[in-house]
Amino acid sequence: DAKYTKGYLLVDDVAYSNGTYMVRFNYTLPEWLREKDFNAMVKYYPSDSWNNVIAYISAPTKVEYVSWNLTYSETMPYFKITCPITTDHACDGSDGEIKAGSRLYIYDNRYALTRGEWYFDQSTQELFVHHDGGEGKGWMDRVIIPTSTTIVSVRGRHFRDGVPSEYVRDIEFTGVTFEDTTFESFGFQSGFNVVPASTGIPDDLAFHIRGGNDIRVRHCGFNGTGGGGILATDASANLTITYNSFHEIGQTAVMLVGNATTQPTHVEVGHNYIQGVGRVLASAAGLYGSSVSNSHFHNNVITEGSRWGIAIRSESFENASSVQNLVEFNKISYMGQQTKDFGGLSFIGYDGVADAETTVQFNCVRDNVGVHSSAAMGIESPYMNYGIYLDNEASGYAIYGNVLKHSVTANLFFHEGRHNVVSNNVLADARNNGPLGKSSSGGQVAFKKKNGWTQNITFEQNIVLWFNNSHTDVLLYDSSGASDFDDRSFYIDRNLYWCVGAEVQDKFLTNNDLTPRGNWLNWTAAGYDHDSHITDPLFLDPSGGDYSFSTEGDPESADSPAHRIGFKALPNTVAWC
């Protein structure tokens, strides 16, 4: 069955009561799953697909079948999933709810072992290892059972409300390798780490800096950790995290969290190679800040992760705003391998948030993935993501000189913010924006206005290029339609648009799905893109990812298309994306 061979079990039928689910799968299962004394652990993906949760799964007793009024089937039995904690309203909130179509991954069962896997029975202290046997058949010479979440803790003294009166200072870690840590989180996101009591994004990190000043972590490796890499909290400041590698780790690589008084400040995170974050708990990022200020995140390569590349958020609780950060020259690719509704670069605000005064420039964000499952469609991928996501009223961002390409829903999403300026970027070929080209789920650029809040949104001097197919009729998308463009909350002008392989007449002039106002003529008549151009920007090789210009397209040339809108050529390290 395709649902099974993709590695997940999809829930077909579900019942719920007080922190316990009964679920059933509509296909025949292997024998080890149908044992009457079956029990194991499960990673399940709640209905919104933002995270996953670790819980307990077992076979119901006969009494439970009767009390739940369930019908027993030998080939398709029910399974009991027990909520591990009650932080998320007994697993019935958005972070923990199981619905039909939710996907499950079952593990930690002795009878499910395949070659190279092991199982440790804590009750009997027995270790079971699966191997093929025989000479030269790859018998494992050791099994590692992690016992600690944190290997190194650097901590100040005499804390009051999360701030130390005495910082730990001037320590450098160089060339240290961190491996084989365990984790304690269950996967919930509640509270987003603003205060220590919140569950938050999973934060079992191998290296914890608490109340540190001038702490430097350089040229270190974080490999195969059950949790994540580096966590900074409790008003830590002047941190340097550079030239490290993070490979196939269970949670976030670098995590910077706190409220208005306890957030880390003046942090440099640069030149790190981050691959495979969120392998255990999917609510994870290459770099996650909630909240962090006055910091510089640059020249990181972040690839093949479960959710975000870089996510920086502000929270209304305890005035936890992230401000005055610089995010530049990062290369982010193939993120969202386990979740949906995210940005490769994601910035999140709240109702009434102050301007972030943050610059995001010269980044390459490409080929985000996205995964979702439902009862009707099964597992869908790629699915719902953005290159840069200005989410939940995120405001006060300057977005300049980036290349955003091959996102699924849109390369850029303005979601209810204000005072955001997006200029001199290349947005290339959002891949699947709307079934059959209709404006029902996305476009090359997406907008969403919040009445009474959204104002002074600028989109100018950008180049938007995409390739013609049945899913690319939509250039500018807004789920509310034309009503969001009745006033002048958005300033959109002096851009260059081009659809490779399409006729201008068909794609722009008569295409009523092109913009929230309809075709190009209706759009410009409404006061938008009056001084914009529909023409080939003359990139060297856009299909091959080279957005530098040919000689004829050089923006320094007065006759070039890019020159007409005032576009400045990007550095080659960014243009080759």
Image (tube, rainbow, N blue to C red):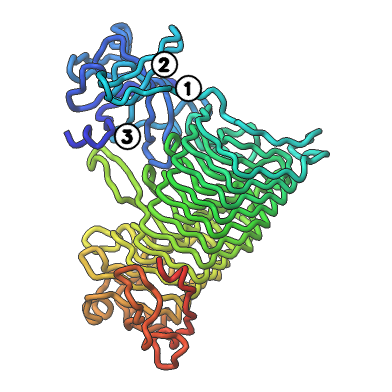
- Category of crowding for the residue at label 3, using alpha-carbon neighbours closer than 10 angstroms: few (below 14), some (14–19), many (at least 20): many
Say what amino acid the circle numbered 3 marks: Ser
Mark before the other along the chain sequence, 3 or 1: 3
Q: Which residue lies under the disc numbered 1?
A: 145
Taking the spot 25% from the left edge, 19% from the top edge, the residue there is 134
Residue 16 in sight: no
Mark 3 → mark 2, Cα distance in angstroms: 28 Å
Say what amino acid the circle numbered 1 marks: Ile
User: Which of the two residues, 496 or 273, is positioned nearer the viewer here?
Assistant: 273
Q: Which residue lies under the disc numbered 3?
A: 102
- Category of crowding for the residue at label 1, using alpha-carbon neighbours closer than 10 angstroms: few (below 14), some (14–19), many (at least 20): few
The answer to the question of whether label 2 and label 1 lie on touching residues, with beta carbons closer than 8 A, is yes
Numbered-mark total = 3
Q: Which residue lies under the disc numbered 2?
A: 120
Determine whether 193 is above or below 268 in the image.
Answer: above
Taking the spot 71% from the left edge, 40% from the top edge, the residue there is 234
